[in-house]
Image (cartoon, helix red, strand yellow):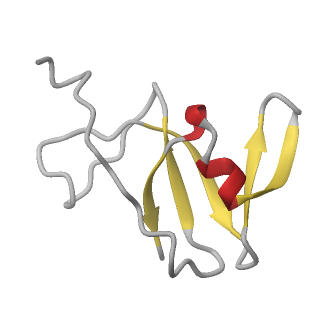
Amino acid sequence: GDSQSKRIPLTPDFSNLEIGDLLFMRGHQGYYNDIFFPDEKIYIGHIGVYDGEGNVIHARQSVGKIISQPLQELIRMPNMEIVLVKRY
């Protein structure tokens, strides 16, 4: 099929998250090229920061502000598919 619409099955590991880890969520604009995905574009539209206590800090356009949301709640949201976790 068309490489632009190809879905890559991703299963980020949430078991050892640390404070400050970045969680990248799928979106329709922008992309993140990474050595983990050679020759592929992973479309990233949203980023959150793990707070070390089970929550993700991120902007929610629907409420118009930065919020702290439980990671488990965020994982269940179909429009917030977490595709990559990075530690810097």
Image position of 56 with respect to 15: above or below: above
Q: Give the left or right position of residue 65, taking residue 5 as reference.
A: right
* Image location of residue 31, percent across then percent down: 37, 38
Q: Give the left or right position of residue 26, taking residue 56 as reference.
A: left
Based on the displayed image, in which of its 4 quarters is residue 56 positioned? bottom right
Quarter of the image with the N terminus in it: top left
Q: Give the left or right position of residue 42, taking residue 29 as reference.
A: left
Q: Residue at x 84, y 51 (%)?
A: 67
* Image location of residue 37, percent across then percent down: 20, 52
Image position of 2 with respect to 18: above or below: above
* Image location of residue 3, percent across then percent down: 16, 25
Q: Residue at x 46, y 25 (%)?
A: 28
What is the total number of numbered labels drawn onto the structure image? 0
* Image location of residue 77, percent across then percent down: 63, 39
Q: Nearer the viewer, residue 66 or 55?
A: 55
Q: Nearer the viewer, residue 84 or 64?
A: 84
Q: Residue at x 23, y 23 (%)?
A: 4
Based on the displayed image, in which of its 4 quarters is residue 35 positioned? bottom left
